[in-house]
Image (cartoon, rainbow, N blue to C red):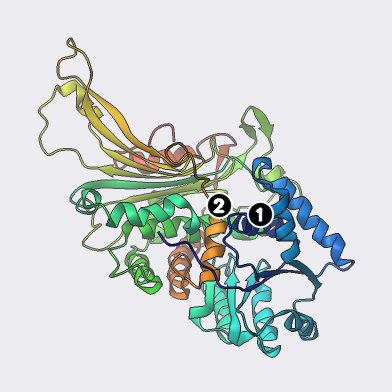
Amino acid sequence: MPAITVDATTFALFGALGDLALRKLFPALYQLDRAGLLNSDTRILALSRDKGEPATHLERIDQALRRYVPAAQLDEAALGRFQARLGYLTMDFRNAEDYAALAEQVSPAMPLIAYFATPAAVYGSICEHLAGAGLAEQTRVVLEKPIGHDLESSRLVNDSVARFFPETRIYRIDHYLGKETVQNLIALRFANSLFETQWNQHHISHVEITVAETVGIEGRWGYFDQAGQLRDMIQNHLLQLLCLIAMDPPSDLTADSIRDEKVKVLKALAPITPERLSRQVVRGQYVGGAVGGKQVPGYLEEENSNAESSTETFVALRADICNWRWSGVPFYLRTGKRMAEKVSQIVIHFKEPPFYIFAPEQRSLISNRLIIRLQPDEGISLQVMTKEQGLDKGMHLRSGPLQLNFSETYKSSRIPDAYERLLLEVMQGNQNLFVRKDEIEYAWQWCDQLIDGWSRIGDSPKPYPAGSWGPVASIALITRDGRSWYGDL
């Protein structure tokens, strides 16, 4: 297999001293450099409003690398090489005059990657001033979520960027799309006839997608209370996972072929009317409890909280896709904070055989499941039925896994962080793992009807203890259909 070649770029990181940049982006760039995946001429510019000596701010970045990169992966030679690439500029992102200094640092012979680790309200100003400084023609822009808080505001943000950059040079980040297991969904489905021939309403009973966190707000009250779990997680991460599970085979692996199929899924999502909202959607808000044996406060007791807030920290819902492939197959989505366990997984439940020939008391065992784990241990497991070993067992069945655990199977390989893959794809000019404008808009359109429905019926979030699996109503949501959440979930 040929080695990956990456052209030289200037990587300009707007908001370089923020939490995302220090915890995720600089460590990801360092890992790419350590792996030999950065061109020797690539430069990294850290841009921030913080004044003072550049050396002081570069030292903060070095300290962040030593804190967030595992000690076994810190190599002084690699660190030295990475630090030699770094430069720092103090900039007011809304001030056009400050972009002249940036332009002086950018070589016209190489592309500029402008990564916006800033609030979306600044995206338009940055794009305008990049264009004013003569940098638009050679620039790819990377947009962090959230892009707006509803359909209308997302269009304003996207339109402000589109004034200066074509869609082919806009990269909208959803870091879940960079995870190794999510990438394997494409290979699993379309490279294995074993699965693709069964991937429809004739063979699949239902699908679960769960993204559960044990953490609370982590000091993000101001942002989160305006957003809530539906906007923060369902609108992007979980709907993107649903699209990858449900989409039809693309004609090829080009970015637009894949994204065209994802858009078809979003357009086929059945609307949830206010009359059906209470049966198909559950929203919750955590109260005090214990997580990992430690007492934690409720959402309304968090630092800087508003005791009157009705923002949801949990959502469970049933989504239906109105097309030939998925007619009658419910997709159950669930996500929340302060849950019992940190886990992200997709469970595909296959239908039972049409006729049962084994002992009647074993009938409840029959259910093949494909379990796709995104975290904490990335891997794929297929639950199958086999006969128990032993001369005295007769034809007694047992359920067991055929399992692929990435960290154990590929012991010589470190599983890269999602941001490493996404940054590398931007440098190579590949848009496959990024979200197109119409995907954002159809996802917001579907979520907006839920938010509007809650407002119409005066729905309030149901309390659930921190350290639990959410409100009791979320269990009833799936139980009404004669099903249950997989395993202990």
Q: Secondary structure at mark 1?
A: helix
Q: Quadrant of the C terminus?
A: top left
Residue 428 appears in the rendering: yes
Residue 453 is tagged as: none
Q: Which residue is mark 1?
A: 27
Q: Nearer the viewer, residue 375 or 75?
A: 75
In the rendered image, the residue lying farthest to the right is 52
226 w.r.t. 204: above or below: below
Disc 2 is placed on an element classified as loop
Cβ atoms under marks 1 and 2 closer than 8 Å: yes
Quadrant for the N terminus, please. Answer: bottom left
Which one is nearer the viewer's eye here, 76 or 197? 76
Q: Earlier in the sequence, mark 1 or mark 2?
A: 1
Residue density around tag 2, few if under 14, some if 14–19, many if 20 or more, within 10 Å:
some
Label 2: which residue?
417
Would you identify the image quadrant in which residue 14 lies?
Answer: bottom right
The x, y position of residue 457, in whole percent, is 48, 58
Residue 127: quadrant of the picture? bottom right
Please indicate whether residue 14 sits to the left or right of residue 137 in the image.
right
Residue under the point 69% across and 60% down? 21
Q: Residue at x 49, y 62 (%)?
A: 456
Q: Amino acid at mark 2?
A: Asp
Residue lying at the far top in this picture: please name it: 392
Q: How many marks?
A: 2
Residue 422: x %, y % from top left: 53, 62
Q: Position of residue 265 (x, y in %)?
A: 34, 65
- Judge by depth and name the residue closer to the eye, 22 or 435: 22
Residue situated in front as seen by the camera: 292 or 481: 292
Q: Is residue 274 left or right of residue 320?
A: right
- The part of the image, by quadrant, that contains residue 59 is bottom right
Please state if 125 lies on the left or on the right of 417 as rendered: right
